[in-house]
Amino acid sequence: MTGTGYIVRGGLVIDPVGNTVEVRDLAIANGRIVASAGDDATVIDATGKVVCPAWIDIHVHLRQPGQDAKETLETGNAAAAAGGFAAVACMPNTNPPLDNPEIIAELVERSEQASKVGIYPIATITRGRSGQEAVDFDEVIAAGAIGWSDDGDTTANSLIMRRVLEASARLDRPVIVHCEDKPLAAGAMHEGAVSRELGIPGIPSAAEEIIIARDLMLAELTGGWLHVCHVSTGRGIGLIQEAKERGARVTAEVMTHHLVMSDDWVRGDRALHNTNEPAGAPGRPGDPNTKVNPPLRPVSDTEALLAALQQGWFDCFGTDHAPHAAPEKSLPYEQAAFGLSGLEFAFPLTWALVRAGHLSELEAVRRWTVEPVRILGRRSGSIAVGEVADVTIFDPEVAWTVTPESLQTKSKNTPLLGMTLRGRATHTIIGGEVAYHGE
């Protein structure tokens, strides 16, 4: 698709900065939102579609360097664009990990060459993610990292956590924490009735909540900025909200899969909770594609997380896009890798909550745009005149069946395979150029 500009005609334009939702045209020229485009602008018919700032995912695993069999910058870029994203923040549990300025600077340079999607690296907290020796907090930020995380593991050393939170207060960048008491979390799925029924060792909710509590205490002690990843329990987000009310600087993300999927999915029941969407055909009990960390929790936790989202306790959404090669997901449940693909399912799962009346269109878009921007400190999340034209057009009603062939990600590890979803990006425009054009 070419032209000196675009007129996105007749879509439902959702502006989370201006707090408006209205059917109107949107004009793009020279890479920016403009009041009007020229006569030679290419018209994109957006009738019946959602037009909004392109989405931003704060929590993605792109697997490079060193894990090309799972994902590459190119395939991750394609999956992000197909999901409606203009930018993603990538986690550092790569091989080698993102624990020094040289490797971070190299990733920044490579991503600028390989990707239209903005890729923002997150540095490790400790060298090699070993939990033993802190990285140079200042140097990795200067090299281009947007924060620090040992994601995939908790930084067990509380003194190191104190030091990185002190650096956070000084540098105004978040410490992005994966909260898991590793010895206590020795199982493979949520510990409860379903794990006992299936005979799969369980992970208790307390394994997550204990570390959330510790990290909140350290954030309050230091005045640092704590960002809690993939909160999966009602008690966990309750602890976070209590700390916020005491004045702690803490932000938190919720993953779409933790809102609409429960441990019932491990049993093979494939109903999207808290939505009006039809259930999928029964899946295979113990399908490794349902194995994720933190695990899918009971239905009661999905409801508690949704209630917290409605009350404004969560700052943003994320996908925790975690691609794995087929051999890693073909093992018995206990040996299979944790993680599922997420980038291309963010919109249909989010909009299922909107259709069910749990979330307004404006609030859904806000938590995928301006709120991630506030945390990452990158891009604008706005579609006001004069802003860079990062725009996504979604068709909220188009039905599509999840198949390996329908996905851009290199890895197809999702329990949604075979299900029919509603809603998908038709255009992702980044910097005024069409980065993705679907049907």
Image (cartoon, rainbow, N blue to C red):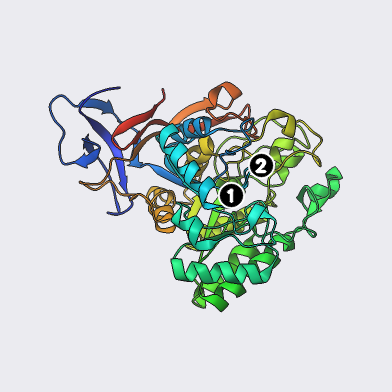
Q: Amino acid at mark 1?
A: Leu
> Image quarter for residue 228?
bottom right
Image location (x, y in percent) of residue 183: 80, 59
Q: Nearer the viewer, residue 413 or 112?
A: 112
Q: Nearer the viewer, residue 160 or 234?
A: 160
Image location (x, y in percent) of residue 18: 27, 54
Q: Residue furthest front?
A: 102
Q: Amino acid at mark 2?
A: Gly
Q: Residue, x 15% and y 24% (percent of image)?
A: 40
> Image quarter for residue 438?
top left
Q: Quarter of the image containing the N terminus?
A: top left
The answer to whether residue 161 is visible is: yes
Is label 2 or label 1 in front? 2
Query: CA–CA distance between discs 2 and 1?
Result: 16 Å
Q: Would you place residue 209 above or below residue 198 in this image?
A: below
Q: Which residue is mark 1?
A: 259
**Secondary structure state at the residue bearing disc 1:** helix
**Secondary structure state at the residue bearing disc 2:** loop
Q: Residue, x 62% and y 53% (percent of image)?
A: 151
From the viewer's perspective, is 18 left or right of 139?
left
Q: Which residue is mark 2?
A: 339
Q: Residue furthest right?
A: 199
Who comes first in sequence, dot 2 or dot 1? Answer: 1
The answer to whether residue 59 is visible is: no
Image location (x, y in percent) of residue 432: 28, 35
Q: Quarter of the image containing the C terminus?
A: top left
> Image quarter for residue 340?
top right
